[in-house]
Image (tube, rainbow, N blue to C red):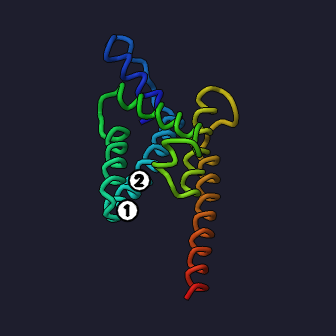
Amino acid sequence: MSMELVKALLMRASNPSSWNFRPSVECDLESLVWVVLYAMMARRLRMVINSGDQVLCEAYERDFNVLWGSTLYFRVMHSHQNMHGAAACYGKGMGDQWFPDPVEGKFFGEVMWKLSGSASGFGTPFTYQVFDELLGRYIVLAEEEERTQEESVDLST
């Protein structure tokens, strides 16, 4: 859910006559970004659960539930703000725990940075083309990383 929609829903809750939200392509795109990040974290959660590391599992599951386990609008907004903040500090905090894979972590940081900059009027507007190029670049990086890991396994055997 886009921040613009969350803010409009919060305003409507306190003043129903103030509802003037109109969906936009930008809101749809931001919602798509949140779906992609959710899927990345859900995949990581499955990996953590399957690892058998109980301490890591409990910590990651707690973070996952805090970030994604609420339908209350103010909590959704707070979670989005936390993720934007974590992305700004990637390499020094929570984002590292949520996305320990370096390629995923860099994608997370860059997509949050582009969303923040676009929403605040700084930087390039965040369009489908920008998102498509970003995804394409990081998919190639992930594939290269996977090939490198496979080659290092082949060399060691």
Q: Nearer the viewer, mark 2 or mark 1?
A: 1
Compared with 29, 133 (above or below) is below
User: The C terminus lies in which quarter of the figure?
Assistant: bottom right
Q: Residues within 10 Å of mark 1 (few under 14, many from 20)?
A: few
Residue type, mark 1 in image? Met
Q: Nearer the viewer, residue 79 or 19?
A: 79
Find residue 26 and report its horizontal and vertical position in percent: 54, 36
Find residue 83 and report its horizontal and vertical position in percent: 48, 37
Determine the CA span between mark 2 and mark 1: 12 Å
Mark before the other along the chain sequence, 2 or 1: 2
Compared with 26, 52 (above or below) is below
Residue type, mark 2 in image? Ala
Residue at the right extreme, as displayed: 123
Pointer 2 with pointer 1, Cβ within 8 A: no
Q: Residue at x 62, y 39 (%)?
A: 114
User: The N terminus lies in which quarter of the figure?
Assistant: top left
Question: Which secondary structure lies at badge 1?
Answer: helix
Q: Residues within 10 Å of mark 2 (few under 14, many from 20)?
A: few
Q: Residue at x 45, y 26 (%)?
A: 22
Residue position marked by numbered label 1 in the rendering:
47
Residue at the bottom extreme, as displayed: 157
Residue 73, by quadrant, is: top left
Residue 71, by quadrant, is: top left
Q: Nearer the viewer, residue 103 or 23?
A: 103
Q: Locate residue 7 relative to residue 113 in the image: left or right.
A: left
Q: Nearer the viewer, residue 54 or 113?
A: 54
Question: Which secondary structure lies at badge 2?
Answer: helix
Residue position marked by numbered label 2 in the rendering:
39
Q: Residue at x 61, y 58 (%)?
A: 138
Find residue 148 and report its horizontal and vertical position in percent: 62, 74
Disc number placed over residue 123 in the picture, else none:
none
